[in-house]
Amino acid sequence: MEALKQRILNDGMALNETVLKVDSFLNHGVDAHLMYNIGTEFKKYFENHGVTKIFTIESSGIAPTVMTAMQMNLPMVTLKKQASKILKGDVYQTTVHSFTKATDYELTLSKKYISEDDHILIIDDFLANGEAALGAIRLVEEAGAKVAGIGIVIEKSFQPGRQLLIDKGYDVYSLARVSKLGEGIIEFIEE
Ligand code: G4P
Ligand code: NA
Ligand code: NA
């Protein structure tokens, strides 16, 4: 997505060789027009994939996902992160380890928001090691539902997440694929 790549080049900043700061339009400040256009792109790619619901993970996945859900006219569910293993009623839960943030959390989905007939599109802001996406996939499949695809706003292609998901047979569509980060360096995979 050309407009997204331009925005990353103009307003993003590589903090080091692995972390891209995009606080001014995605993770802190949120550019609603850009989020809307991101929704249009995800719709174009996924509209014939039989999607019945869209899932994301709190919190930065919510803005692009709500714009996608609106344009695809589909229900949306935000997976919650809980600090500990306290079971709160009828939920599916799985432990996710974040390498970037060096923490574990319990990804949580209420059973009432999924059925085995669902085909779930999972959308998130970043794909790094793929742990969050794999956690979301575990919840969907534990419910007996299917993963229709994975939509990512910014993929860090030099980290293992994408290949892991592709190797497991999932359809991964990323709007910006970053091949390299460094001091003053942001490079993309040209497609
Ligand atoms: P993974 O799921 O692909 O394994 O990623 P990882 O655990 O490493 O990422 C943990 C958190 O860090 C996620 O946010 C993810 O969006 C964010 N993240 C990963 N790489 C980058 C990056 O280069 N730049 C920025 N800005 N964020 C990155 P989170 O803590 O789970 O939630 P939230 O920020 O959405 O609330
Ligand atoms: Na995220
Ligand atoms: Na994030």
Image: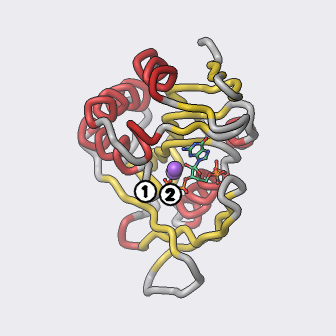
Visible in this render: residue 173?
no
- Please determine whether, in this image, residue 1 is positioned above or below residue 19: above
Nearer the observer, 124 or 20: 20
- Which sits in the foreground, 51 or 78? 78
Q: Residue at x 38, y 36 (%)?
A: 25
In the picture of the structure, the residue carrying the numbered disc 1 is 59
Q: Residue 18 at x, y = what percent?
A: 70, 39
User: Does 160 sit left or right of 98 as displayed?
Assistant: right
Q: To which quarter of the image does residue 117 belong?
A: bottom left
- For marks 2 and 1, the one nearer the N-term is 1
Mark 1 residue's CB less than 8 Å from ligand 1: yes
| Secondary structure type for disc 2 | loop
Residue 102, by quadrant, is bottom right
The correct choice, above or below, for 5 with respect to 127 in the image is above
Residue 69, image x, y percentages: 30, 43
Q: Amino acid at mark 1?
A: Ser
Residue annotated with mark 2: 145
The quarter of the displayed image where residue 190 is located = top right
